[in-house]
Image (spheres, rainbow, N blue to C red):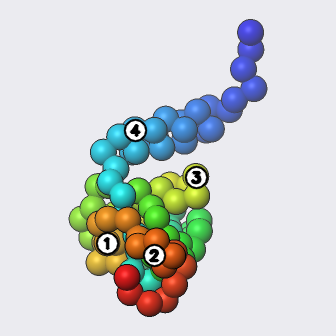
Amino acid sequence: MPSNLTPLFVAAALAASIGAAGAYPATVSAAMPMHALPSSGSPVVAVIPASAPIDANSCRSWCRVSYGGLVGYVQAPFVVAGTPAPGHYGSSLPY
């Protein structure tokens, strides 16, 4: 049976599944742009609200993160390990 999946879609799905294997729960300390590549000059694929739950891995100066079904990069100093306190998702106040 032929598949309608494009090679690009298959590659992206594979990369996301591999990247999620070593991921840990985290949040961002402020609303942050999630970039396609680990560079502030690369396209922004999403804006992650402050305290939104994300999965992070491969952190150095940038962290590879997943949020809302997307995979991208956020500057590491803004990634906080752990999950947000109940009721504080999207809040600008620290939890």
* The C terminus - image quarter: bottom left
Tell me residue 20's x, y (percent): 40, 45
Q: Which of 37 and 64 is in front in this view?
A: 64
Q: Which callout, 3 or 2, points at the residue further toward the start of the chain?
A: 2
Alpha carbon separation for disc pair 2 and 4: 25 Å
Alpha carbon separation for disc pair 1 and 2: 9 Å
* The N terminus - image quarter: top right
Tell me residue 65's x, y (percent): 42, 59
Q: Is residue 7 left or right of residue 60?
A: right
Vertical order, 61 against 50 (above or below): above
Circle 4 — which element?
A: helix
What label does residue 69 carry, if any?
3
Alpha carbon separation for disc pair 1 and 3: 19 Å
Q: Which callout, 2 or 4, points at the residue further toward the start of the chain?
A: 4
Q: Which callout, 4 or 1, points at the residue further toward the start of the chain?
A: 4
- Mark 2 highlights which residue? 51
Disc 4 marks a residue whose amino acid type is Ile
User: Residue sitting at 36 percent across and 58 percent down?
Assistant: 25
- Mark 4 highlights which residue? 18
Vertical order, 43 against 13 (above or below): below
Circle 2 — which element?
A: loop
Q: In this view, does 82 lie to the left or right of 37?
A: left
Give yes or no for contact between labels 4 and 1 (Cβ–Cβ under 8 Å): no
Circle 1 — which element?
A: strand
Tell me residue 3's x, y (percent): 72, 20
Alpha carbon separation for disc pair 3 and 4: 14 Å
Q: How crowded is mark 3: few (under 14 residues within 10 Å), some or many (20 or more)?
A: few
Q: In this view, does 60 lie to the left or right of 55?
A: left
Res. 76 in view: yes
Residue farthest left in this picture = 60
